[in-house]
Amino acid sequence: MFRYRRAGLAAGAVLLATSLSLAACGGGGDDANEGADAKTLTLWHYEGPTSAMGIAWNKAIDMFKASHPGVTVKFEEKGFEQIQQNAQMILNSDSAPDIMEYNKGNATAGLLSKQGLLTDLTDQATKRGWDKALTPSLQTTAKYDDQGIMGSGKIFGIPNYGEYVEVYYNKDLFQKYNLQVPTTLDEFTKVMDTFVKNKVTPLSVGGAEYPAQQIFYELALSKADRTFVDNYQLYKSKVDFHGPEFTYGAQTFADWVGKGYIAKNSAGIKAEDMGVAFEQGKFPIMISGSWWYGRFENEIKNFQWGTFLFPGNKLHPGSSGNLWVVPENSKAKSLAYDFIDITMKPEIQNLLGNNGGVPVAADASAITGANKDLIDNFNKVSAEDGLAFYPDWVAPGYYDVLTGGVQGLINGSKTPSAFLDEIAKPYNDNLADLGK
């Protein structure tokens, strides 16, 4: 989700060892009549300025300005929720930006492409070499068919980083209680039991936004295989929401609340507050995406921290990163293509990797320090065909369905069975609308 986020993923490393030869800036080609004379590029994204992506995109803006004298970049930082909830209305109006970051998946980029609100980037991707920079697994979220289903069809967005959900932990607090990094789910629960016994709530959780549902999905994936993921995400076959995967995820999530691993007041906590609480050392563990990594490197000063993959899982929420999309109503499409091109250049990709991001086209030898662990873990997951996408991608409006449902598990207003019934209906309704 954040990241927002497929038939058989191909194995492959996210880093390319050699630099890419991408087309030079300024080429409009067949799109010369589509805003080639524009003097303003309006750009939206929702990455924080200290995040790896925020740092890289700000540098890309500087490079764009240098290579496009006389062009003004009107950058507007938007909130994730703001774009998530209002994209259809905005892109269907004259207020659409020329280029924007948008969440990948059937319910987001897929839906907008189906509605004709996004520009087909297939020709540009071929001409500028973007298609060669992205492994088949990373292209899954860039392509959508006529029904808005990811994995095939035309390219409607370009990802230039990867992402996945992992576990962040406070090394100082683990050491204080003589705890080791767990390698199985059973060991993980024993770690959390130790914290509870010492009156420490183990998990920093944001129930009001995306993070909590990622925990539910991780738990479901602990009982899942690739067939389950393809059935759920790609509609290859019917999904039993009361089957072993989702039943285990819902029941175990509720059990974690009951055991005190997850605070009941976290139902009202947003993602930002969850991250800040972990930064402040109030919680020893946080389960969320790799997009936090660069920020934590910059902002955590008072304790040592690290990461590990969700113990025991071979499948993890993750995918390519969010997409650069060009709205169909963009007034400066040629400039938008040039900006995407810059974000794929080694200088930007290396900068992203060295600030805690997961680049798709960096020079491997240019990535240094602890960031190699972040990228190595992503490569490990990708090589094992372990990217399972995000649970909210599967139907329009499903993000809100899952958020509300998981909040019910946290505050005790819903039983696991009722939660599964609640999330099954809109999913199956969407399948019926698609004729599946």
Image (cartoon, rainbow, N blue to C red):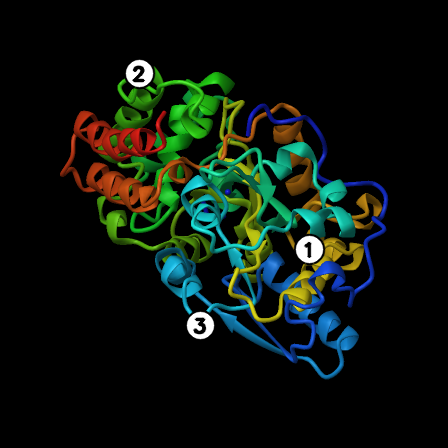
Q: Is residue 329 visible?
A: yes
Screen quadrant of the N terminus: top left
On the image, the x and y values in percent for residue 22 come to 81, 53
Of badges 2 and 3, the one in the foreground is 3
Residue designated by label 2: 243
Lower sequence index among marks 2 and 1: 2
Which one is nearer the viewer's eye here, 347 or 286? 347
Amino acid type, label 1: Leu
Report, in whole angstroms, how far the alpha carbon at label 2 lies from the one at label 3.
45 Å
Disc 2 to disc 1: CB gap under 8 Å: no
Residue sitting at x 64%, y 42%: 374
Amino acid type, label 2: Gly
Residue designated by label 1: 352
Give the SS element for disc 3.
loop
Residue sitting at x 26%, y 25%: 251
Badge 3: how crowded within 10 Å, few (<14), some, or many (20+)?
A: few
Report, in whole angstroms, how far the alpha carbon at label 3 lies from the one at label 1.
30 Å
Screen quadrant of the C terminus: top left
Give the SS element for disc 1.
helix
Amino acid type, label 3: Ser
Which one is nearer the viewer's eye here, 425 or 28? 28
Residue designated by label 3: 95
Furthest residue toward bottom: 70
